[in-house]
Amino acid sequence: MVNSIIDGFNEYFEIVPAISEELKIEAYKLRYQVYCLETDFENIDQYPEKLEFDEFDKQSVHCLIYHRKQEIYVATTRLILPDRDNPDKLFPIEIHSTIDNLDAMKHVSRTHLAEASRFCVSKAFRRRKNEINLITGTGYDMGDVFTREERRVMPHITLGLIAGLIKMSHENDIDNWYAVMEPALIRNFSTLGINFISLGPLVNYHGKRQPCTIRLNDLLDGVAHKNLSHWNMLTNKGRFWKTDAD
């Protein structure tokens, strides 16, 4: 039996920064699998090379979740960084949705703002569609593939992806996130103490989605209030985040 969430996660999974071209291709392959084959989020015909990527990947940093026993990548996400040469360059959220909650953004510096996106988990590591946690858990009859302890740890894949985003934000001096998410995912995050702020009306972008923002210190304060073990995992016990007092 493992002693902590971090120990349990690290026993079976590894958060891998996709800093090489080879690892970025692994992220694009997984995104193709999830968004084109498993969910029909994207049109398969647009990606003949079976790699799902777009023009924003050039200004993004990426991470992957690696399953040690099966030796495969099972989840990925990216952080679209601001264009340092042109901070007013629009993020995808600003192109595809209406932002009318201007008060939420009035004190946010665009040079410290990034968009979290392409948050995805392989089908075998998600719950069934009719279950509440849309991107966590095991789903299906995987008893012959995963041990009981592995199945217990799998819901923390979500935390692993957020931890990757936190680390990338720390390394790139990012204080605030944009995100466009399904309302059910926003509710799922709120159970962890992560309370996104709505920026505008729902947009019909591959289904109904909400443009949101969150200040990362607020995110981590909310998580710490709910579950300090989750905070420790997201920050690697405080190593990957600064506080307002720092």
Image: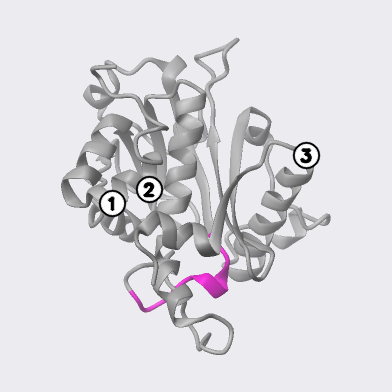
At label 1, counting other C-alpha atoms closer than 10 Å, the crowd grade (few under 14, some 14-19, many 20 or more) is some
Give the CA distance from mark 1 to mark 2: 6 Å
Magenta extent: 121-131
Q: Are marks 1 and 3 in contact (CB under 8 Å)?
A: no
Which image quarter holds the C terminus?
A: top left
Q: Magenta residues: mostly which secondary structure?
A: loop
Residue in view at x 67 percent, y 50 percent? 27
Which image quarter holds the N terminus?
A: bottom left
The image shows residue 183, relative to residue 145, as above or below, that is above
Amino acid type assigned to the residue bearing label 3 in the image: Glu
Amino acid type assigned to the residue bearing label 1 in the image: Ser
Residue 136 occupies which quadrant of the picture? Answer: bottom left
The image shows residue 130, relative to residue 228, as above or below, that is below
In this rendering, the label closer to the viewer, 3 or 2: 2
| Residue 218 on image: x %, y % | 24, 33
In this rendering, the label closer to the viewer, 1 or 3: 1
Location of mark 3 (residue): 21
Q: Is residue 174 magenta?
A: no
Q: Nearer the viewer, residue 153 or 204?
A: 153
At label 3, counting other C-alpha atoms closer than 10 Å, the crowd grade (few under 14, some 14-19, many 20 or more) is few
The label shown at residue 229 is 1
| Residue 5 on image: x %, y % | 36, 58
At label 2, counting other C-alpha atoms closer than 10 Å, the crowd grade (few under 14, some 14-19, many 20 or more) is many
Give the CA distance from mark 3 to mark 2: 27 Å
Give the CA distance from mark 1 to mark 3: 33 Å
Q: Are marks 1 and 2 in contact (CB under 8 Å)?
A: yes
